Image: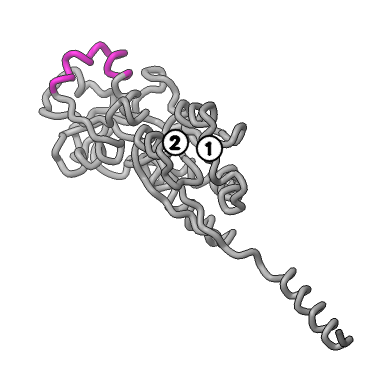
């Protein structure tokens, strides 16, 4: 091989080493309550890393069933800490990859001003036809809503008026469209700029339900995915925590 050819090959190798790593996609299953912040986080992630986060939103319980049946997700951002722990235990997620990315807040909300008072006494008065919650067996915010009604001693009274959505997103839709006068939804769905952005609301005191710790976990199929690993790290970055706080969560 000639010296000219050797120099050419050497230069080509150097260029290849300097070339940027090819951008990749990461498939992310996202709890419905985290829809708005995750859209912003995904945009920042793509801008900063070049990798694209492909987002699917829904109920955590439904995602668990899909993942255990082979759904091609790389990362799960759950609405609780139970499902990610269960996935780790069952070998469907990478051990020790789990961490709490946000702690959520529950809010009783109506799309109409003046319906929900600042102390939530509307629940005791009962002058409404329907109250929406997420399905408690599928969505942790739904379980927190049931726990809240029980703590208030109102579960039996309110049960005939309850309409359930599969996810907290569907529960929010019931209220926002007027199919239910009020409902228990995620604070992040109605919170912007440090205040409730529309309608009327009562932020449920944390003592009325167990903490809504939302965990992220790396799924087993993505244990060697650079894009997935970078997203997990990105969720812990200070700029990401600032976005999470802006929607009423505690990072």
Foreground of the two, 232 or 209:
232
Which residue is under mark 2?
78
Q: Residues within 10 Å of mark 2 (few under 14, many from 20)?
A: many
Whole-Å distance between the Cαs marked 1 and 2?
8 Å
Residue 4 against residue 216 in the figure, above or below: below
Q: Which residues are magenta?
A: 147-160
Tag 2 or tag 1, which sits nearer the N-term? Answer: 2
Picture residue at 80% right of the left edge, 83% below the top? 8
136 drawn magenta:
no
Picture residue at 78% right of the left edge, 73% below the top? 14
Query: Which residue extends farthest front?
Result: 1
Foreground of the two, 206 or 30:
30
Which residue is under mark 1?
217
Is residue 115 shown to the viewer in this render?
yes
The local secondary structure at tag 1 comes to: strand
149 drawn magenta:
yes
Residue 94 position, x and y percent, is 58, 36
Picture residue at 50% right of the left edge, 46% below the top? 74
Labels 1 & 2 near each other (Cβ < 8 A): yes
Residue 49 quadrant: bottom right
Picture residue at 44% right of the left edge, 23% below the top? 211
Foreground of the two, 34 or 62:
62
Residue 63 position, x and y percent, is 39, 38
């Amino acid at each position: 091989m000639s010296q000219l050819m050797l120099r050419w090959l050497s230069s080509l190798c150097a260029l290849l080493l300097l070339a940027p790593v090819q951008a990749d996609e990461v498939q992310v299953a996202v709890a419905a309550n985290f829809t708005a912040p995750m859209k912003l986080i995904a945009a920042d992630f793509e801008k900063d890393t070049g990798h694209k986060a492909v987002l699917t939103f829904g109920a955590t319980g439904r995602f668990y069933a899909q993942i255990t049946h082979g759904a091609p997700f790389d990362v799960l951002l759950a609405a609780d800490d139970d499902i990610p722990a269960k996935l780790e235990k069952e070998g469907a997620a990478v051990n020790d990859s789990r961490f709490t990315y946000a702690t959520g807040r529950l809010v009783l909300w109506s799309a109409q001003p003046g319906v929900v008072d600042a102390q939530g006494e509307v629940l005791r008065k009962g002058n409404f036809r329907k109250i929406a919650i997420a399905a408690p067996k599928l969505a942790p915010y739904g379980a927190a809503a049931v726990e809240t009604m029980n703590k208030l001693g109102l579960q039996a009274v309110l049960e005939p008026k309850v309409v359930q959505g599969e996810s907290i997103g569907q529960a929010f839709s019931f209220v926002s469209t007027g199919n239910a006068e009020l409902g228990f939804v995620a604070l992040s769905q109605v919170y912007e700029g440090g205040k409730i952005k529309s309608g009327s609301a009562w932020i449920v005191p944390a003592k009325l339900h167990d903490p809504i710790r939302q965990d992220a976990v790396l799924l087993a199929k993505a244990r060697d995915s650079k894009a997935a690993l970078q997203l997990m790290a990105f969720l812990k970055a200070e700029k990401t925590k600032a976005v999470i706080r802006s929607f009423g969560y505690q990072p």
